[in-house]
Image: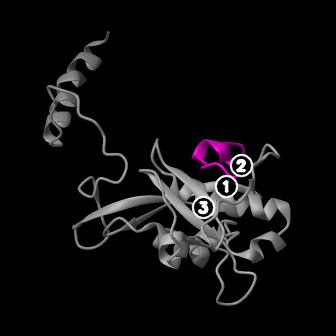
C-alpha cells in the first residue's frame, strides 16, 4: 500500500463519521408489509401504507405499489383495479383487465359490499363475479382473476373465493387449465407474473 493510500484512509473514515450515519450494534429489520408506521407517506410526513396492486403488462401481471394514508379495504382495492393504472403507469404499457363489460356493472365486487352472505375463513375474501365475466375471452378471464387474487390475497394465509350473486362458489379457470371452485392463493397465479 502506498503512502498516499495510507494517508487517505483516515480522511475517508472522517467523511463517513461526518455524514451522520453511525454504526448500529444490533441488526434491525427493514419495514415490510402494511405496517402503517413503516413508510413515510407523501402527505406531510404522516405515516402511510404501501399496498401492492397488480396490473396487466403484455398479458402478464406486474405489481404496482401505491401509498395510502390508511390500509384500503378489499372493495377499495377492487375499485382501484377497476379504475386502472395512473397516466404515468399507463404510459409504461400497464392496463387493467377489470374494465366492466356493461356500464355501471363491475365485473367483480366483494360479497360484503354487495350484501351477499358468504361464510369465510380468517384471511379469506369472498368476491362476487358478475355474469358478464363469462363473456370475456379466456385469457382476459385469467387476467381478471389474477389481478384480484394477487391484490387481495396479499398475506401468506390470504385466500380468495369466487361466488355468484347468491353466494354459491363458482368454478374459475387457473393458468394450468384446471377449473376450480376452491379458495385461491397468490401461488395459483404465479405463472402469470411477469419476470
* Apparent side of residue 125 relative to residue 122 in the rendered image (left or right): right
Q: Which mark is residue 100?
A: none
Q: Is residue 133 magenta?
A: no
Q: How many neighbours does mark 1 have within 10 angstroms: few (below 14), some (14-19), or many (20 or more)? A: many
Q: Residue at x 68, y 69 (%)?
A: 95
Q: Determine contact: label 2, label 1, CB under 8 Å.
A: yes
Q: Position of residue 58 (x, y in %)?
A: 76, 59
Determine whether 148 is above or below 107 in the image. Answer: above
The residue wearing badge 3 is: 148
Q: Residue at x 19, y 36 (%)?
A: 15
Q: Which mark is residue 61?
A: 1
* Apparent side of residue 185 relative to residue 175 in the rendered image (left or right): left
Q: Position of residue 109 (x, y in %)?
A: 57, 73
- Is disc 3 placed on a helix, strand or loop? helix
Q: Earlier in the sequence, mark 3 or mark 1?
A: 1
- For the record, the magenta segment spans 181-195
- State the quadrant of the C terminus: top right
Amino acid at each position: 500500500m502506498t503512502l498516499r493510500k495510507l494517508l487517505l484512509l483516515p480522511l475517508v473514515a472522517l467523511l463517513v463519521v461526518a455524514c451522520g450515519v453511525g454504526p448500529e450494534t444490533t441488526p434491525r429489520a427493514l419495514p415490510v408489509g402494511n405496517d402503517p408506521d413503516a413508510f413515510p407517506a407523501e402527505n406531510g410526513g404522516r405515516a402511510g401504507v404501501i399496498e401492492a396492486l397488480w396490473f396487466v403488462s403484455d398479458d402478464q401481471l406486474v405489481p404496482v405499489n401505491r401509498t395510502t394514508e390508511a390500509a384500503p379495504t378489499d372493495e377499495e382495492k377492487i375499485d382501484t383495479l377497476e379504475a386502472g393504472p395512473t397516466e404515468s403507469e399507463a404510459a409504461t404499457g400497464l392496463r387493467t383487465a377489470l374494465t366492466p363489460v356493461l356500464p355501471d356493472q363491475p365485473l367483480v365486487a366483494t360479497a360484503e359490499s354487495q350484501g351477499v352472505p358468504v361464510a369465510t375463513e380468517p384471511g379469506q375474501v369472498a368476491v362476487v363475479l358478475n355474469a358478464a365475466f363469462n363473456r370475456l375471452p379466456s385469457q382476459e378471464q385469467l387476467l381478471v382473476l389474477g389481478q384480484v387474487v394477487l391484490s387481495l390475497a396479499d398475506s401468506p394465509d390470504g385466500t380468495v373465493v369466487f361466488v355468484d350473486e347468491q353466494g354459491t362458489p363458482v368454478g374459475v379457470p387457473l393458468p394450468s387449465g384446471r377449473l376450480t371452485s376452491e379458495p385461491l392463493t397468490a401461488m395459483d397465479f404465479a405463472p402469470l407474473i411477469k419476470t
